Image: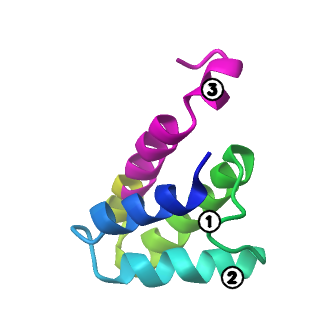
């Protein structure tokens, strides 16, 4: 999985929801003690949960849910083998 590409795509598409998305993404990486190139698909799931929770608080529950869905779509595209291994494709 190319986690840098995953985060960049989420940032670009998430800006439609709010300019705060980039800051939320960066803060959650920092809170997890990670950099953009360290996410595995499993860690990305935890990251998505943290980001969507923070986004729900900062930009509203609907935007938080929309961001969560966007992030899962991007993760599925970036790491299809991860979802296939769990029988979710």
Coordinates of residue 3 in the picture (x, y in percent): 59, 57
Relative to 32, is 8 above or below?
Answer: above
The residue at 43%/45% (across/down) is: 74
Q: Which residue is mark 2?
A: 30
In magenta stretch: residue 48: no
Neighbours of disc 3 within 10 Å: few (<14), some (14-19), many (20+): some
**What secondary structure is the magenta-colored segment mainly?**
helix
Disc 1 secondary structure class: helix
Q: Which residue is mark 3?
A: 81
The residue at 39%/75% (across/down) is: 21
Coordinates of residue 25 in the picture (x, y in percent): 51, 74
Q: Earlier in the sequence, mark 3 or mark 2?
A: 2
Location of residue 82 by image quarter: top right
Magenta residue span: 67-89
Question: Closer to the camera, 74 or 57?
Answer: 74
Disc 3 secondary structure class: helix
Q: Is the Cβ of the residue at disc 2 closer than 8 Å to that at disc 1?
A: no
Q: Which residue is mark 1?
A: 50
The residue at 67%/45% (across/down) is: 41
Disc 2 secondary structure class: helix
Relative to 86, is 54 above or below?
Answer: below
């Amino acid at each position: 999985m190319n986690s840098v590409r995953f985060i960049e795509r989420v940032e670009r598409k998430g800006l439609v929801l709010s300019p705060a998305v980039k800051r939320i993404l960066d803060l959650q990486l920092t809170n997890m003690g990670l950099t953009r190139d360290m996410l595995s698909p499993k860690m990305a799931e935890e990251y998505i949960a943290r980001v969507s929770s923070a986004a729900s608080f900062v930009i509203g529950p609907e935007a938080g849910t929309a961001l969560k869905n966007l992030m899962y779509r991007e993760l599925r595209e970036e790491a299809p083998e991860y979802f296939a291994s769990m029988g979710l494709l």
